[in-house]
Image (cartoon, rainbow, N blue to C red):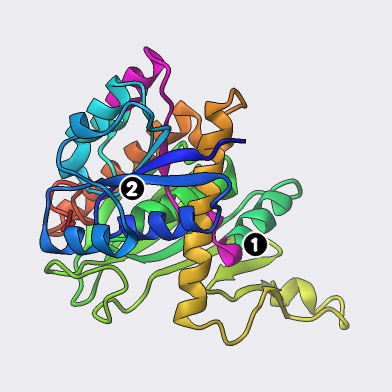
């Protein structure tokens, strides 16, 4: 099979897609870097031996896939690539209006448009999703407790959509500002939800030490609570004490996914693998296979709509999750 020629868009987070493509040289061939020409992006192009393109019209016609990590400031370039018939894997977060426009443009041409929510394909997060999917065959969730920062809110909502199969009905109604976290009450998939969001207050980079948490998710059931403590895990099940006491031998907690000692470098490896997973899904869709569940148009629209509803609730507390229009991206 001839390797698919990949155009990486954005020289900052875009480096993660470069690393992902390099893991599969028989499947993917790096065709160049699309950016505005910052010193960083020029250094990235030099380091990996990539051609540098400053506009989407400069990219050659034989591009098979574009991986876009430019923030909303690069949306015009994404739409231009889709208009040229080039399929795009676009990094989150994105506004609902843009998602609808991109999907409509892809529907009218040969290109495919996927939106990478990222987190749900990291191994510990996948373990949480799989557990919730199995559990909901027996009982409905009773509550959701979500703690995120302004960069991780979109990916966390996408994770809950994978866990429950949908986010609807959702609502985020009341927000209370706090010194570190703003708290929002509402519902997700018809389940009472509490969301705490740490806003960076300034342009904090991804994985900045200024963020106190990446993602914490707890889903409660009548029989117990399953908790993801971070993107690196662990995932733990705590049985309902009142119910477990009726069965003296039942453990009150057990690990669902536990890999002790995962380093920052190890987590980065898994995050790159998650991006590669999303690239593979787009490649299969381009070859005529079905869209993955999280890439169905209605699902992408649903997550983007939920993110905007969360942002609107947070504005009542004096802020919002990282606005795609102002999210700092070095291109």
Residue at (49% x, 35% y) in the render = 295
Query: Is 104 contained in the magenta span?
Result: yes
Q: Where's residue 312, x and y in %?
A: 21, 46
* The label number, if any, that marks residue 92 in the structure image: 2
**Element carrying mark 2:** loop
Q: Is residue 255 above or below residue 219?
A: below
| Residue 230 visible in image | no
- Which residue is farthest top? 108
The residue segment tinted magenta is 100-125
Is residue 209 inside the magenta stretch?
no
Estimate the x, y position of residue 66 in percent, counting from the top left: 36, 38
Q: Left or right of 286: which side holds 93?
A: left
Res. 226 in view = yes
| Callout in the foreground (1, 2) | 2
For disc 2, the neighbor class at 10 Å (few under 14, some 14 to 19, many from 20) is: many
Q: Is residue 180 above or below residue 270?
A: below
Task: Tell me the element at label 1.
Answer: helix
10 Å crowding of disc 1: few (<14), some (14-19), many (20+): many
Identify the residue at horizontal 26%, vertical 47% (top origin).
Answer: 51
* Quadrant assignment for the N terminus: top right
**As drawn, is 202 to the left or to the right of 151?**
left
The structure residue drawn at horizontal position 38% and vertical position 33%, both measured from the top left corner, is 63
Residue 225 sits in which quadrant?
bottom right
Q: Disc 1 vs disc 2: Cβ atoms closer than 8 Å? A: no
Q: Give x and y (percent) for residue 180.
A: 22, 76
Q: Earlier in the sequence, mark 1 or mark 2?
A: 2
Name the residue at 41% across, 36% down: 65
Q: Which residue is mark 1?
A: 127
């Amino acid at each position: 099979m001839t390797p698919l020629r990949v155009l990486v868009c954005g020289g900052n987070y875009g480096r993660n897609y470069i690393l992902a493509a390099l893991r599969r040289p028989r499947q993917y061939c790096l065709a160049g870097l699309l950016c505005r020409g910052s010193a960083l992006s020029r250094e990235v192009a030099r380091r990996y031996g990539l051609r540098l393109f400053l506009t989407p019209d400069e990219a050659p016609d034989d591009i098979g896939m574009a991986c876009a990590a430019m923030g909303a400031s690069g949306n015009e370039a994404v739409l231009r690539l889709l208009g040229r018939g080039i399929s795009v894997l676009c990094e989150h977060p994105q506004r609902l209006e843009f998602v609808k426009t991109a999907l409509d443009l892809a529907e009218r041409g040969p290109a495919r448009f996927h939106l990478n929510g990222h987190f749900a394909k990291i191994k510990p997060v996948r373990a949480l999703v799989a557990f919730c999917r199995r559990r909901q065959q027996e009982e409905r969730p009773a509550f959701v407790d979500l703690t995120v920062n302004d960069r991780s809110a979109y990916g966390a909502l996408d994770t809950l959509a994978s866990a429950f199969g949908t986010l609807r009905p959702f609502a985020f109604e009341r927000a209370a500002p706090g010194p570190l976290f703003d708290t929002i009450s509402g519902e997700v998939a018809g389940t009472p939800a509490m969301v705490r969001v740490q806003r960076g207050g300034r342009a904090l980079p991804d994985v900045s030490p200024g963020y106190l948490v990446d993602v914490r998710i707890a889903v409660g059931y009548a029989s117990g609570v399953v908790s993801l403590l971070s993107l690196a895990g662990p995932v733990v099940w705590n049985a309902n004490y009142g119910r477990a006491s009726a069965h003296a031998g039942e453990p009150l907690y057990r690990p669902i996914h536990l890999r002790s000692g995962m380093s920052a470098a190890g987590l980065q490896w898994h995050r790159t693998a998650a991006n590669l997973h999303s690239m593979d899904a787009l490649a299969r869709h381009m070859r005529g296979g079905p869209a993955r569940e999280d890439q169905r148009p209605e699902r992408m629209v649903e997550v983007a709509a939920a993110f905007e509803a969360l942002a609107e609730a947070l504005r009542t507390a004096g802020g919002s999750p990282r606005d795609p229009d102002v999210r700092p991206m070095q291109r």
